Amino acid sequence: MSEGHTGVWAIVLAAGAGSRFGGGKLLARLGGRPIIETVLDNLREAPVDKTIVVVGADAQSLREVCMRYGVRTVANREWERGQSTSVLAGLRACSGRAAVVLLGDQPFVGADAVERLVAAFAEGANVAVATYGGKRRNPVLFSREVWPLLETELAGDEGARSVLRRHPELVVEVPCEGVGDPTDVDTREDLRRLEEMRGIVGGYKMAEGRKSRPKNVR
């Protein structure tokens, strides 16, 4: 975690069963350690005050990893109803002025992408969404002012995308090319490709052909 207080908490969504992967996805090893560890390690460098990990399937094993990082876990007993339930579970447990939501299966979204969203919040953004090549992806930051809207409108497995489409006036897009990569792990083949993306000396090859600073992925 960076020094100082930003009022921003991180919420990592890690409740899904990973059925396309065959189960146990976030505990699968990337670079010799569980995927979820890379995500948590990235957040140590990010300007967030606290981190919450929302768990559902594989809850006990994920809690054991999170304990080593001093990270709080929140159980989502409704995780099978879709990603929206995990977002809401995380927000209900959050005491910050804003929350940046990340996916547990995107290990190459680095601290610098989070930092850009936090900067946008400091400049007045209610919702800040990372873009890569002009396309909205993750992470996404929500100020506390919009949490009641999410409580009302979030549903299903789409996360916040439909809400953002309905309220474009709230959204600030934040380009994150070259400082993060939103590639996710859905299948074991995805994991193999991500392993190939890893560069030398702890870096990794970015989607735009550049490398991140080695501090973010070891």
Image (cartoon, rainbow, N blue to C red):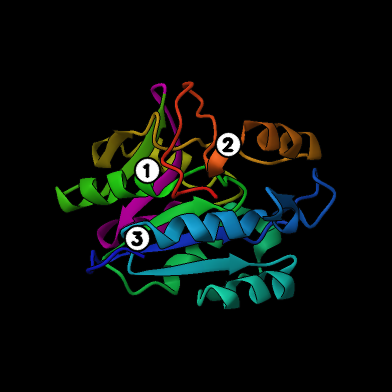
Does residue 44 sit above or below 175 in this rendering? below
Task: Name the outermost residue toward the right.
Answer: 22
- Disc 2 crowd rating (10 Å Cα; few below 14, some 14-19, many 20+) is few
Q: Position of residue 20 (x, y in %)?
A: 80, 43
Which mark sits nearer the N-terminus, 1 or 2?
1
As drawn, the residue found furthest toward the front would be 201
Q: Which mark is residue 209?
A: none
Compared across the picture, whether 103 is left or right of 45 comes to right
What residue range appears in magenta? 133-153
Task: Kindly identify the amino acid type of the residue bearing the numbered disc 2.
Answer: Ile
Membership of 145 in magenta stretch: yes
Residue type of the residue flagged with mark 3: Trp
Q: Residue at x 56, y 61 (%)?
A: 86
Q: Nearer the viewer, mark 1 or mark 2?
A: 2
Q: Dots 3 and 2: beta carbons under 8 Å?
A: no
Q: Quarter-wise, where is residue 58 in the image?
A: bottom right
- 200 falls in the magenta region: no
Point out the tag, 3 or 2, that comes first from the N-terminus.
Answer: 3
In percent of width and height, residue 129 lies at 36, 40
Left or right of 94, for residue 80: right
Residue 83 vs residue 8, the one in the foreground: 8
The residue that mark 1 highlights is 113
Viewer-proximal residue, 1 or 215?
Answer: 215
| Residue 94: quadrant of the picture | bottom left
Helix, strand or loop at mark 2 = helix
Q: Residue at x 75, y 53 (%)?
A: 28
The numbered dot on residue 200 is: 2
**Going 15% across and 49% down the picture, which residue do you hit?**
124
Look at the numbered disc 1 and give the secondary structure of its residue: helix
Residue that protrudes farthest toward the left in the picture: 123
**Which residue carries the number 3 mark?**
147
Q: Residue sitting at 30 percent across and 34 percent down?
A: 173
